[in-house]
Amino acid sequence: MRMLLKAQMDTRRANEANRDGTLPEALGQMLNELQPEAAYFFPEDGKRTALLIFDMQDPSQIPPTLEPFFQNAEASVYLTPVMTREDLESGLQQVRG
């Protein structure tokens, strides 16, 4: 299932993780594992923020996917299923019956 992950990192903790190298290492490893179809990084509300769109094969992927953000950046993390335009059109056709 296609998922949207948004992580807002604690500024102090993310600064420390960036200085000691754990933040770029954790982000690189996560991006290699998830192979997101899109990955964006930007400041929001004064915090480093990541937005990833990726395919989740099984709910058991949730802990290993989110833990790097929790452990390395004390991040607030949001995870939600999302659809493409084609997915939405297909779903709406099913509802119309």
Image (cartoon, rainbow, N blue to C red):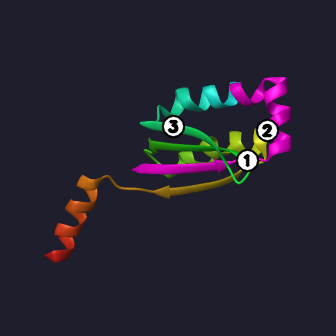
Residue 16 vertical position relative to residue 62 in the rendered view, above or below: above
Q: Helix or strand or loop: what does disc 2 sit on?
A: helix
Q: Describe residue 86's horizontal placement relative to residue 77 as left or right.
A: left
Q: Describe residue 59's horizontal placement relative to residue 41 as left or right.
A: left
Q: Which-is-in-front pick, marks 3 and 1?
A: 1
Residue with the mark numbered 2: 14
**Marks 3/1: CA distance?**
17 Å
Task: Please tell me the numbered disc located at residue 1.
Answer: none
Do the CB atoms of the residues marked 3 and 2 lie less than 8 Å apart?
no
Task: Please tell me the numbered disc located at residue 39.
Answer: 3
Residue that appears at 77% across and 42% down: 73
**Marks 2/1: CA distance?**
9 Å
State the residue lying farthest toward the bottom.
Answer: 96
Q: Quadrant of the C terminus?
A: bottom left
Q: Earlier in the sequence, mark 3 or mark 1?
A: 3
Q: Which segment is the magenta one?
A: 1-24
Residue 97 vertical position relative to residue 81 in the rendered view, above or below: below
Q: Earlier in the sequence, mark 2 or mark 1?
A: 2
User: Type of residue at label 2?
Assistant: Ala
User: Type of residue at label 1?
Assistant: Lys
Q: Helix or strand or loop: what does disc 3 sit on?
A: strand
x and y percent of residue 91 in the render? 24, 65
